[in-house]
Image: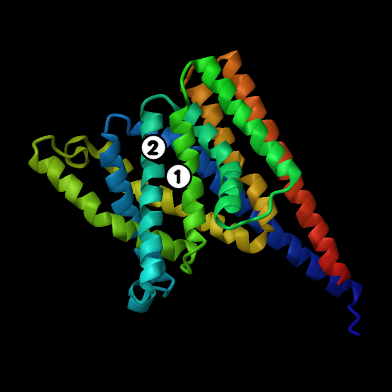
Amino acid sequence: RKEYTPAFSACLMSSTQHQHLKGYNYAITAMALWGAFPVYWKWLQTVDTIEVLAHRTIWCALFTLLVLYQQKRLTLDLLLVRPVREWLVLTASAVMIACNWGLFIWAVHHDFAIEASMGYFLSPLVSIMLGWLVFREQLRALHWIAIFLAAIGVLVQIISVGATPWLGLMISMSFATYGALRKFASADSMTGLLIETLILTPAAIAYLIWLEVAGGGMSFIFAGPGLTFLLLMSGVVTAVPLMLYVASTRLLALSVVGFLFYINPTLQFLIGRFIFGEPFSGGQLAGFALIWLGLLIFTAESLRRRKRNGVRQRIA
């Protein structure tokens, strides 16, 4: 049996703490950037939503391509040598992420940032429902309680506003479905993002060409250097948070990263309410409170189970 000196043990602990600190920095920065997205897309409010989405797709593909090339991970085999089934999965996930991006940009452009944030609050609960339906994952009683509270929260929103929050529901379902589809693909996050955006790029380029030929003109050309720069950088602001998120998952427990994810919709909610000044009634607050309570129960149960499983593994 090896025995470590106090100095070595302290050094080992310091190294572990340093790695955890790096992980927290990566995760919090990623979530903060995602949470600040409404401000970025608001700056592009004068540009058509589909045009913004097209530019986001093209420049994200190019930036991700350059990153993987710089990391010496870019090969033809990486991109092309994949089973037909995986190509179908990545095509479906590309459509889902395009829908998610487009819905969110449209929501911000049309003053629905608060409702969009609700979509991301709901997405973990939609994900566990998909896990139950698609992957036959077992749900515990507290999971069902969390889902029930979220459903009641949505119902309260419907009664309060007088309309179904379709935008928030579609954002949550598209994001959760995207995550479920990616479980069937072997590609890592960055490679998957590259393939997905490359799949979408021909349609994005075709739309921009049509926009120019049809006489509308591309904002990229005619809107001035400020908007042109923002459209160019849309790919960078899409890929960088994902890179930080992936780095954080290598240094922190997934339960911790999952908990930190709520920074994202919380910031989106606060931006929508206090920066954009979107209306928010007492009934909407009650609906959100029920969703937040459901998330609190879900997160507490997930953390409890992970802690218990960790204790069992140490005993074994």
Q: Nearer the viewer, residue 167 or 256?
A: 167
- Looking at the image, is 123 positioned above or below residue 280? below
On the question of residue 64 being in view, the answer is no
Element class at badge 2: helix
What distance separates the C-alpha of mark 1 from that of mark 2? 9 Å
Please give the name of the residue rendered at 39% of the width and 61% of the height, measured from the top-left corner. Answer: 90
Q: Mark 1 points at which residue?
A: 174
User: Relative to residue 5, is residue 280 drawn left or right?
Assistant: left
Q: Quadrant of residue 288?
A: top right
For the question of whether residue 248 can be seen, the reply is yes
Task: Name the residue at the bottom extreme.
Answer: 1
**Picture quadrant of residue 15:** bottom right
Mark 1 and mark 2 residues within 8 Å of each other at the beta carbon? yes
Circle on res. 103 = 2
SS class of the residue under badge 1?
Answer: helix
Residue 265 image point, x, y percent? 56, 36
Q: In this view, does 258 lie to the left or right of 106?
A: right
Q: What residue type is labelled 2?
A: Leu
Q: Which amino acid does label 1 sit on?
A: Ser
For image coordinates 49% across by 66% down, the residue present is 188
Identify the image quadrant of the N terminus: bottom right
